[in-house]
Amino acid sequence: MKAPILIFGWGNPSRGDDALGPLFIERMEALDLPGVECLTDFQLAVEHALDLQGRHRILFVDASVDAAAPFTAGRIAASRDESFTTHAITPQSVLQVYTDLEDAEPPPCWLLAIRAEQ
């Protein structure tokens, strides 16, 4: 059985600030919160839509050079954007893939964008 809450951070630890998502996940895993599953990867892909199945809430976490310091956070919705057919896609596109596969709205999702400098 899947945990009701998924926290998904992505980024490449060998690329400086791009590691902020995976580092956030490491900190969350150390808290050992009940009902929370943490997941990390180098980038988002359409297959990650399957990780949303059976969840009640999802928090995506990534580094961003566009975010206001120290971070921005907000609710996100499914959207078929330009990344939909690329190798790395946006969280909104992952939600759209979920919607297409399940013929249902995805669970409530938020994006935490942590300010990156490099």
Image: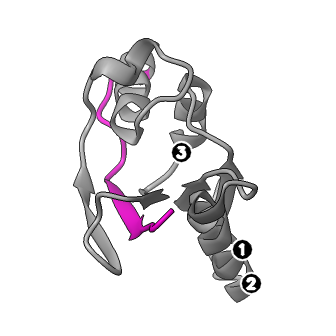
Q: Is residue 60 visible?
A: no
Q: CA distance from mark 1 to mark 2?
A: 6 Å
Left or right: residue 102 versus residue 43 is left
The local secondary structure at tag 1 comes to helix
Q: Residue 79 appears in which quarter of the rendering?
A: top left
Which residue carries the number 3 mark?
54
Q: Position of residue 53 (x, y in %)?
A: 53, 39
Mark 2 is surrounded, within 10 Å at the Cα level, by few (under 14), some (14 to 19) or many (20 or more) other residues, namely few
Q: CA distance from mark 2 to mark 3?
A: 23 Å
Mark 3 is surrounded, within 10 Å at the Cα level, by few (under 14), some (14 to 19) or many (20 or more) other residues, namely some
Label 2 is placed on what type of residue?
Answer: Ala
> Depth check: 103 or 11 in front?
11
In the image, is residue 98 above or below residue 4? above
Pointer 2 and pointer 3: residues touching (CB < 8 Å)?
Answer: no
Which residue carries the number 2 mark?
30
Q: Is residue 104 magenta?
A: yes
The magenta segment: 102-118
Of label 2 and label 3, which has the lower sequence position? Answer: 2
